[in-house]
Image (cartoon, rainbow, N blue to C red):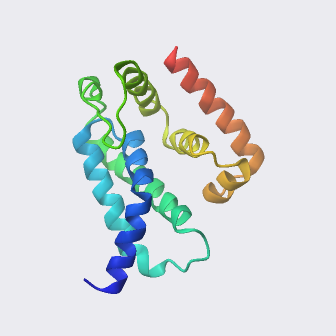
C-alpha cells in the first residue's frame, strides 16, 4: 500500500460517519446505502489527488459525498422507487439505540427520503451544525436563500413527521 493510499484511508476512517449518514439520508434500504457508501468512497479516492488542502478534508468529503449521492439517487430513481418495507429493516451500525429511539430514527429517515435532493442536503448540513454561511459556501447559494430554503425544508420535514 502506498503512502497516499494509507493517508486517504486514515482520513476516510476518521470521517466515515459522514459518508454513512449521507448514504442513509439518500437511500432507503441497506443494500442501496452500502452501494452509495462504496460509490462515495470510490469517487473520493478518484478525486483525492486533486485535494489541495485549501479546505478541511471533511468539507471536501462532504461536497463529494453530497454530489455523488445526488447523482446516485437520480440513477437509482430510474431503476426503483422507495420501498417502505425496506425502511423497517434499517439499522444503525455505529450506535445502539433503544427501541423508541430507533423508531424515531426510522420515522425521521423515512421523512427525509421524501424531500428533494437540495432539501436533503440542507437538512444534513443543519443536523451537522453548519452555519448559514458555511452552507452557502458549500452549496453556492446565498445565505438568505439558504435560510429561506432551510426553513421550508424544516417545515416540510415537520409536516411529514406529524
User: As drawn, is 35 to the left or to the right of 45?
Assistant: left
Question: Which residue corresponds to the image point at 43% horizontal and 61% vertical from the top-left?
Answer: 14
> Which sits in the foreground, 43 or 77?
43
Q: Quadrant of the N terminus?
A: bottom left
Q: How many numbered marks appear? A: 0
Question: Which residue corresponds to the image point at 60% horizontal and 32% vertical from the top-left?
Answer: 153
Q: Position of residue 112 (x, y in %)?
A: 46, 32
User: As drawn, is 111 to the left or to the right of 3?
Assistant: right
Question: Which residue corresponds to the image point at 34% horizontal and 40% vertical from the top-left?
Answer: 27
User: As drawn, is 65 to the left or to the right of 96?
Assistant: right
Q: Position of residue 106 (x, y in %)?
A: 38, 26
Question: Which residue corresponds to the image point at 28% horizontal and 58% vertical from the top-left?
Answer: 38
> Which sits in the foreground, 147 or 12?
12
Outermost residue toward the top? 162
Q: Position of residue 81 (x, y in %)?
A: 29, 33
* Quadrant hosting residue 56: bottom right
Amino acid at each position: 500500500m502506498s503512502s497516499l493510499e494509507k493517508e486517504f484511508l486514515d482520513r476516510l476512517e476518521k470521517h466515515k460517519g459522514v459518508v454513512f449518514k449521507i448514504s442513509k439520508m439518500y437511500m432507503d434500504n441497506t443494500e442501496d446505502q452500502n452501494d452509495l457508501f462504496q460509490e462515495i468512497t470510490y469517487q473520493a479516492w478518484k478525486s483525492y489527488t486533486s485535494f489541495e488542502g485549501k479546505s478541511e478534508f471533511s468539507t471536501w468529503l462532504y461536497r463529494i459525498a453530497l454530489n455523488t449521492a445526488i447523482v446516485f439517487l437520480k440513477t437509482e430513481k430510474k431503476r426503483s422507487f422507495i420501498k417502505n418495507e425496506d425502511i423497517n429493516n434499517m439499522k444503525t451500525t455505529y450506535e445502539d439505540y433503544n427501541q423508541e429511539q430507533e423508531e424515531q430514527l426510522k420515522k425521521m429517515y423515512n421523512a427525509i427520503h421524501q424531500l428533494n435532493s437540495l432539501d436533503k442536503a440542507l437538512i444534513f448540513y443543519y443536523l451537522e451544525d453548519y452555519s448559514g454561511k458555511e452552507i452557502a459556501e458549500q452549496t453556492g447559494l446565498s445565505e438568505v436563500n439558504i435560510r429561506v430554503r432551510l426553513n421550508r425544508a424544516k417545515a416540510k420535514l415537520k409536516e411529514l413527521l406529524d
